[in-house]
Amino acid sequence: MYKRLFCLFCMLFCLATIASARIIYQGNNKHQVALTFDDGPAPIYTAKILDILKQDNVKATFFVIGQKVTAEPDLLRRITAEGHEVGNHTYYHSKLTWINDEKLVDELIKTSLTIYEISGAYDKLFRPPHGTLTKAKIKTITDLGYDIVLWSDNADDFYHTGWGMRTPKSIANRVPCRIKGGDVVLMHDDSPQTSQALPIIISEIKRRGYKFVTVSELVGRPLR
């Protein structure tokens, strides 16, 4: 186990020295859009979303939680087998302002190792749960070679304390009306509302002439 962890640390160090890590909000290509999905893989709904993406020939980026990957390994294998990109979303969906650097590194490495052991994929992208970051945490993450991916269009497709969840129609209307070329779209693959809204979102964004790509493709960094 520790030998594998050491090898993974070496791999991440090499990634850090090959190219400087970045904070990504959007890309420069005005004809492309990147759909991203957080908080999975989730039983039922991740599979539904993958079915839709496959049917519409769309590639996306999934920011997965290590604990959920362990619980749903076949879904991760399907994500990578169908040509989608995988990013790190911590092991327990930990809010970064609530944990120290040691805990953060442990969750990053544990998630990366889990992704690799199940799918053979190397994750090089990280999205902070809840979008929370500090300068110290940014340094810790980028020193390990990750690009930090935020977003420029937000589907707002998660549960809000007080008023609940948007309807599929609301989500489907919100994303296309805010879309611009180069956008990174934040969505979640753990709800029925998003899976119901997704076909409409894809159809409308395609109608406007945009091409769907992964985050790495959007920013011109090849997949490893």
Image (cartoon, rainbow, N blue to C red):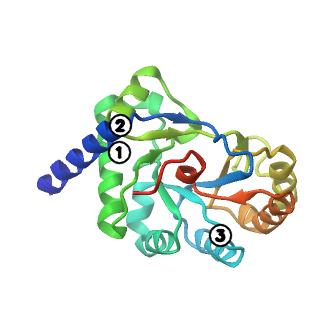
Is the residue 102 above or below the residue 208 in the image?
Answer: above
Within 10 Å of the Cα at label 1, are there few (<14), some (14-19), or many (20+) other Cα atoms?
Answer: many
Amino acid at circle 2? Leu
State the residue at coordinates (32%, 41%).
18
Determine whether 70 is above or below 38 in the image. Answer: below
Asked which quadrant contains residue 143, the reply is: top left
Residue at the image position 75 percent from the left and 45 percent from the top = 181
For this view, does 125 lie left or right of residue 171?
left
Which x, y percent locates residue 169?
Answer: 87, 59
Q: What whole-number distance in Å separates the C-alpha atoms at marks 3 and 2?
A: 29 Å
Q: Residues within 10 Å of mark 3 (few under 14, many from 20)?
A: many
Q: Secondary structure at mark 1?
A: helix
Query: Cβ–Cβ below 8 Å for labels 1 and 2?
Result: yes
Q: Residues within 10 Å of mark 2 (few under 14, many from 20)?
A: many
Q: Is residue 35 left or right of residue 132?
A: right
Which is more toward the observer, 207 or 191? Answer: 207
Name the residue rendered at 52%, 74% in the picture: 82
Of badges 3 and 2, the one in the foreground is 3
Res 104 label: 2
Residue 50 point in image, percent of width and height: 61, 72
- The amino acid pointed to by label 1 is Leu
In the image shown, does 162 or 158 lie closer to the viewer? 158
Q: Please give the residue where the numbered disc 3 appears in the rendered image.
A: 49
Mark 3 residue type: Ile
